[in-house]
Amino acid sequence: MIEEQGTVVARSGDSVRVRTQRRTACGTCAVQNACGTSFLERYVGRRAVELSALNQANAAVGDQVVIGIPEQSLLKAAAAAYLAPVLALLAGALMGETLGGTHADATSLLGALLGLALAMIWQRGYSVTSAPDPLILRRLEVAASAVPPPEIREDFQE
């Protein structure tokens, strides 16, 4: 289970909206000053991410929680994000070259672009239908003097 900490900002039935802080592994990397990810993080900054999660721990608005997503789900999402476009691009290029005749270069390029476009359309549907909801694994104990984060909403609509 891949875990991340966040704050519950809204609740509706058996699901909640959780705000987490986007993080990278740059703090522990030896080449953090020469890396593109580190460069982007310095200039773009870290943004908060809100996501919907199943509320198995009965968390309330303002609670600090640990959310989790199965590793298998992350592997499937990574394969869909990286492997599908490359394979579709190559398949489109090969089909274009095969069917192109005397204009094989041009049809290969068009086939590659068509394959990539179809992969992107497929990805959009795949990500909506197969993305698992993160689960709230547990609530974290917070000191009594803790101040709730800004912009907490009592209810939300999905």
Image (cartoon, helix red, strand yellow):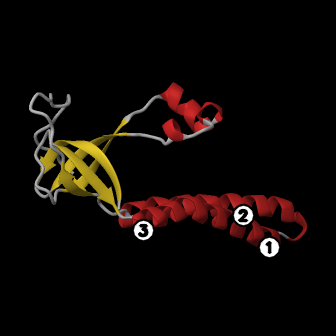
Residue indicated by mark 2:
111
Q: Amino acid at mark 1?
A: Leu
The local crowd at label 3, few if under 14, some if 14 to 19, many if 20 or more residues have their Cα within 10 Å, is few
> Which label's residue is closer to the chain start, 1 or 3?
3
Q: In the drawing, what numbered circle is on residue 83?
A: none
| Of residues 149 and 86, the one drawn nearer to the viewer in this rendering | 149
Residue indicated by mark 1:
99
Give the foreground label among 1 and 3.
3
Residue 125 appearing in the image: no
Q: Marks 1 and 2, how far apart in space? A: 10 Å
The local crowd at label 1, few if under 14, some if 14 to 19, many if 20 or more residues have their Cα within 10 Å, is some
Q: Marks 3 and 2, how far apart in space? A: 32 Å
* Mark 1 vs 2: CB contact within 8 A: yes
Give the foreground label among 3 and 2.
3
- The residue depicted at 65 percent of the width and 62 percent of the height is 86
Q: Amino acid at mark 3?
A: Gln
Examine the image and state in which quarter residue 72 appears: bottom left
Element carrying mark 3: helix
Residue indicated by mark 3:
72
| Of residues 93 and 68, the one drawn nearer to the viewer in this rendering | 68
* Mark 1 vs 3: CB contact within 8 A: no
In screen coordinates, is 7 left or right of 94? left
Element carrying mark 2: helix
| Of residues 152 and 136, the one drawn nearer to the viewer in this rendering | 136
| 102 w.r.t. 12: above or below | below
In screen coordinates, is 39 left or right of 97? left
- The residue depicted at 33 percent of the width and 54 percent of the height is 3
* Image coords of residue 1 (percent x, y): 35, 62
Q: How many marks?
A: 3
Q: Marks 1 and 3, how far apart in space? A: 38 Å
The local crowd at label 2, few if under 14, some if 14 to 19, many if 20 or more residues have their Cα within 10 Å, is many
